[in-house]
Image (spheres, grey):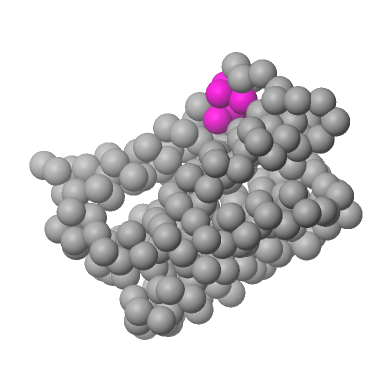
């Protein structure tokens, strides 16, 4: 791999790590970059998942003091994410390559739309309860979102923030830390499945991972000063362009 391609992958990983910790949508940066460098969709998705696997964890560590009080309910939520992430990864590996190629523009476009509508969706839905997280409201939706996270994952942060907010959490920063912890659970299981199945392109994976670790940690600090709205707009613009590009390539 030449220096220019390596630098591009590291920069994409760093940008994805920052995006993941602040506004979500890291895969809208990194996944199209991997496709643009010539990786097949299945390999690109697996490489992307493993390359970004530590970014959410680093973002949670950077703002660790703002995490919600941990107890049995949150431990169960973490386990649910581990199980769902494994199921999603197995589903991805069973998806025929020809079908996944056709799904790529829809996955990127759907995640971009979700990221764009995320704040509006959260404003329209009522809070789920008083005095903390209501497990009965969030357990099954979080399980479904974790399966999606193991399968593709772009926009997962937006989905989880919405679910947790509806379930009774109202402080953005503590909810954001919990979101990052839960996504780490998804990564914990899906990563091992992709590694076990040999679905990765290792040089690209390691470069993405190095960039995303730095970006995730930086984003955990930048969230205190950088407007999430500006980050979201930049990611939406990138995701829209990628959707148009791959729709033209794979559909037309």
198 lies above or below 233: below
Is residue 120 covered in magenta?
Answer: yes
Could you say which is closer to the camera, residue 39 or residue 71? Answer: 71
Magenta highlight: main SS: helix
Image x and y of residue 80, in percent: 58, 55
Residue 115, position in %: x, y? 50, 36
Task: Report the span colored magenta.
Answer: 118-122
From what the image shows, is residue 190 above or below residue 139? below
Quadrant of the rendered image containing residue 122:
top right
The answer to whether one can see residue 56 in this image is no
The quadrant holding residue 3 is bottom left
Going 26% across and 64% down the picture, which residue do you hit?
A: 94
Q: Is residue 63 above or below residue 232?
A: below
Identified at 62% across, 38% down, the residue is 138
**On-image quarter of the N terminus:** bottom left
Name the residue nearer the viewer: 141 or 64. 141
Residue at x-position 41% and y-position 73%: 194
Relative to 93, is 20 on the left or the right?
right
In the rendered image, residue 155, in percent from the top left (x then y), is placed at 50, 44
Residue at figure coordinates x 78%, y 42% from the top left: 173
Quadrant where the C terminus lies? top left
Left/right of residue 119 with respect to residue 205 in the rendered view: right
């Amino acid at each position: 791999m030449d220096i220019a391609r390596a630098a591009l992958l590291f920069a994409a990983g760093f940008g994805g790590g920052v995006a993941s910790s602040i506004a979500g949508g890291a895969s809208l940066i990194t996944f199209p970059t991997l496709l643009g460098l010539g990786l097949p969709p299945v390999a690109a998705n697996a490489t992307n998942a493993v390359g970004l696997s530590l970014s959410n964890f680093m973002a949670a560590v950077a703002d660790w003091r703002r995490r919600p009080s941990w107890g049995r309910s949150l431990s169960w939520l973490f386990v649910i994410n581990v199980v769902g992430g494994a199921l999603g990864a197995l589903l991805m590996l069973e998806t025929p390559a020809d079908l996944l190629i056709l799904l790529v523009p829809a996955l990127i476009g759907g995640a971009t739309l979700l990221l764009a509508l995320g704040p509006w969706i959260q404003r329209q839905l009522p809070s789920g309860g008083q005095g903390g997280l209501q497990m009965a409201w969030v357990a099954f939706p979080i399980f479904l979102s974790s399966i999606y996270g193991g399968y593709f994952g772009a926009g997962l942060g937006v989905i989880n923030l919405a679910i947790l907010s509806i379930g009774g959490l109202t402080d953005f920063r503590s909810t954001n830390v919990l979101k990052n912890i839960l996504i780490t659970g998804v990564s914990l299981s899906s990563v091992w499945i992709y590694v076990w199945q040999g679905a990765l392109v290792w040089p690209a994976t390691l470069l993405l991972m190095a960039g995303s670790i730095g970006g995730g940690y930086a984003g955990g600090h930048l969230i205190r000063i950088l407007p999430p709205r500006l980050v979201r707009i930049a990611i939406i613009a990138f995701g829209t362009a990628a959707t148009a590009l791959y729709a033209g390539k794979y559909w037309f």
